[in-house]
Image (spheres, rainbow, N blue to C red):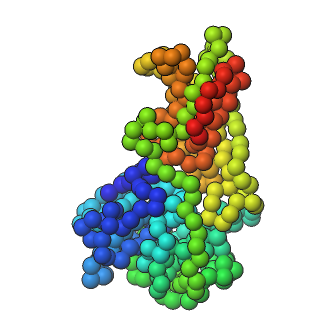
Amino acid sequence: MIFRLSDFHFPDDAARLYPDTPERPWVLEVGFGDGRFWPHHAASLPEAPNYLGVELSGVSLLKAERRLRAAGLTNAVLTKLPATVLVREVVPQGALDAIIVNFPDPWPKAGHTEHRLLRAPFFRLAASRLKSGGAVLLTTDHDEYFEFARAEAEASGVMAVERTDAPPAALETKYARKWRDLGLSAHHARFTPTAHPHVPHGAVTRSPENEENPTVPHAVLTLPQTFDPQDFAKHTARGGQTRETAPEGEGAGWTVVLLDLYRGLGREGWVFLAHVVEGELTQEVLIGVTGREDGTHLVRLARFGGPIITPGVKAAVGTVTGWLEGQGAVVRHRGY
């Protein structure tokens, strides 16, 4: 089953995600590619654990979903998200039995190591989400990344490193087969938590089903009679914490770009298209400006597209409100 970010709870529960097999171990695979690993690996076990897979490629997501369905693996949830966002926001503390990382992107160019997944902050996050006895399992053909990951795990202060043989299924992935055809060897390591630090979930919530719910980011304002949407031009706002000052496991600030302004289809009003970036998480949201009977206008996050209410999304509503203030609007109420 393929989940969007808005289909999850924050955090979520294995019993809700896998109602038919809630008692089974829970395994996360990061970067599953076209999904070859899990059917091979699950077939080697007495019963298939509950599987959560995360991948950034939409094409790979669809290929993997078909592959797992053909293998009869119904207790599997796939999603297209950055791995850190999924682990931090969706997975509860101490819930996972394993995190599997097969042939991750090594980001080999100088200055690109900050893009690598297996750095000390991720190891600390992983240790907080793994059960006692759980592990991060890494298989890679990249010598330097392997040593880098081992050093970062040790630097995290919460992981012990053991070099072992790779599971046979890890050598059946698309990249493993390319590596095998070239006669290269793979490295495999097992990283087990020596401590389980508390890494909090962020300020992420699901959008309420009822758009009139007061928890949906909104504002009430009066537009000037001279307001002209033709005056709109792309507008950018930034805020939040810097990467250096943000607490570990939380986002490093937000950027909101108001891309366009459209005439509304229903009642009098307009719709802003906003691009919201918060660290690895990107969302495009619609923010409506709707006329009310008392002559004021309601600025409110729209539910279209299943937006997740994050600090950046709240800031997007505030950015629209601020832009309208710049056009002469008078704000009567803020709810973001």
Q: Residue 273's image quarter?
A: top right
In the image, is 198 to the left or to the right of 25? Answer: right
| Residue nearest the viewer, comparing 143 with 127 | 127
The answer to whether residue 181 of the structure is visible from this angle is no
In the image, is 61 to the left or to the right of 146? Answer: left
In the image, is 248 to the left or to the right of 77? Answer: right
Give residue 101's position: percent from left, percent from top.
50, 72
Give residue 35's position: percent from left, percent from top.
38, 64
Q: How many marks?
A: 0
Farthest residue toward the top?
Answer: 225
| Residue nearest the viewer, comparing 145 with 242 | 242
Name which residue lies at 69% across and 80% down.
155
21 above or below 272?
A: below
Name which residue lies at 64% across and 70% down.
121
Quarter of the picture containing the C terminus is top right
10 above or below 258?
A: below
66 above or below 73?
A: above
Give residue 262's position: percent from left, percent from top.
53, 22
Name which residue lies at 60% across and 48% down.
311
| Residue nearest the viewer, comparing 280 with 224 | 224
Quarter of the picture containing the N terminus is bottom left
Give residue 110's position: percent from left, percent from top.
74, 64
Q: Residue 96's image quarter?
A: bottom left
Name which residue lies at 54% across and 44% down.
283
327 above or below 138?
A: above
The answer to whether residue 288 of the structure is visible from this angle is yes
